Amino acid sequence: MPKQKTAPDSSRRSEAARRAILTAALDLVGELGYAKLSIEGIAAAAGVGKQTIYRWWPSKGALLFDALLTFATDGQDGQSAALPDTGDLAADLKLVLRATVAELNEPRYDQPMRALHTEIVHDPALAADYAERLDGPMREIKKERLRAAQRAGQLAGDVDLDVAVDLLFGPVLNRWLQRTAPLTPEYADQVVDTALRGLRPRDRQG
Amino acid sequence: MPKQKTAPDSSRRSEAARRAILTAALDLVGELGYAKLSIEGIAAAAGVGKQTIYRWWPSKGALLFDALLTFATDGQDGQSAALPDTGDLAADLKLVLRATVAELNEPRYDQPMRALHTEIVHDPALAADYAERLDGPMREIKKERLRAAQRAGQLAGDVDLDVAVDLLFGPVLNRWLQRTAPLTPEYADQVVDTALRGLRPRDRQG
């Protein structure tokens, strides 16, 4: 058995402190908004020293990203992440996008998700971390479902799957971020139907 | 003739100060980034007092938005804003989206445009102002081109034009903001082609 770097007790304590910090960060960002969120405030709420936080995270944005990632994957076994596949592509995509709409409309996620999505715009290192740990794996899961649809003849074989993901999943996020109009389940359905069938007129011979 | 509220000299001086402030804001955000941009710094660079700026703009975000809007509309007569219409919808949309790609890749616009797009995410008042003064009118111009395409039989008559605008114009902005992959003219073309023809397989009788 390899020698452990830290004794079990110490790593249990570290893990407890880590969870307390992540919980405090999510609670406080919901309460105060991201602009007023401070490392000092998080440290006080979590009962740890500021230096502990600075040792583990390079920025407020990185800490918040870890918090979202930790609580988003809690209760999942980490293996079963896949989009539903009932054989009906449109229905499966609507189910997923309606769930996204419901989550984005949750007050508890509003502030931290907005903060994450704006921090990555300004912070290339955080953007790379986000791409590697969240957007990349999520995109792969979406593309896997689209590949199955291609095999089933429900999606054109020559579609670029990254473009397909952008057309299907981008609009809901944009409408929420920019508040251009209310984000409803009906909008999710419309995006799926329109992206699948395209903007051109239907076959006139049909 | 109605009585003027301010004498011509005074309003000329105000306009000169306003332009100096807007220019300084754009210069400084490009140099320092949005996080380090301060009202103090802008006032010093523009040669005005801080109070002048606070009197005219409620926030750093609102000032930056005005700066972008002022310089984006300079040199336009304000009437001729329309998308090209050569009769070929796909070609016209590609032209517009490729121009957007080129603009977003301009270093001078990178910082201020990123700042604007993230400020509106956190500031509902600025988002409403943005919707009214920029996104709304631009969206109307895009929809006007799509309506012409519907009349010409190049776009399905029952497509929701807001959804169409979201599918056509959102992906380029997202890829730039999130840096998920390089933003190229080829990507612009792919988005247009894929949105127009849809993700479903082409008519198998064809």
Image: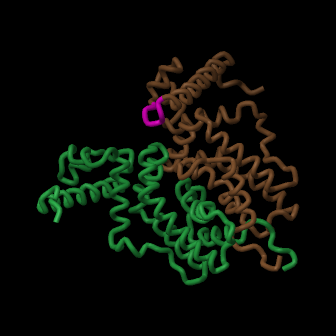
Chain colours: A green, B brown
Q: Is residue B35 magenta?
A: yes
Q: Residue at x 42, y 45 (%)?
A: A125
Dividing the image into 4 quarters, which one contains the N terminus of chain B?
A: top right
Residue range highlighted in magenta: B32-37
Q: Which residue is drawn at 67% across and 63% down?
A: B163
Relative horizontal placement of residue A196, taking residue A138 as reference (left or right)? right
Confirm whether residue B128 shows in the render. Answer: no
Q: Where is residue A130 in the image (x, y as percent from the top left)?
A: 43, 54
Q: In this view, does A90 lie above or below B162?
A: below
Depth check: give the residue in front, B121 or A7.
A7
Depth check: give the residue in front, B68 or A60.
A60
Q: Where is residue A1 in the image (x, y as percent from the top left)?
A: 16, 66
Confirm whether residue B1 shows in the render. Answer: yes
- Residue at the farthest bottom position: A86
Q: In this view, does A90 lie above or below B135?
A: below
Q: Position of residue B173 (x, y in %)?
A: 60, 50
Q: Quadrant of residue A106?
A: bottom left
Q: Which residue is drawn at 32% across and 44% down?
A: A58
Relative horizontal placement of residue A38, taking residue B35 as reference (left or right)? left
Q: Residue at x 61, y 72 (%)?
A: A189
Q: Where is residue B107 in the image (x, y as percent from the top left)?
A: 58, 34
Dividing the image into 4 quarters, which one contains the C terminus of chain B?
A: bottom right
Q: How many labels does the image show?
A: 0
Q: Is residue A107 magenta?
A: no
Q: In this view, does B206 lie above or below B134?
A: below
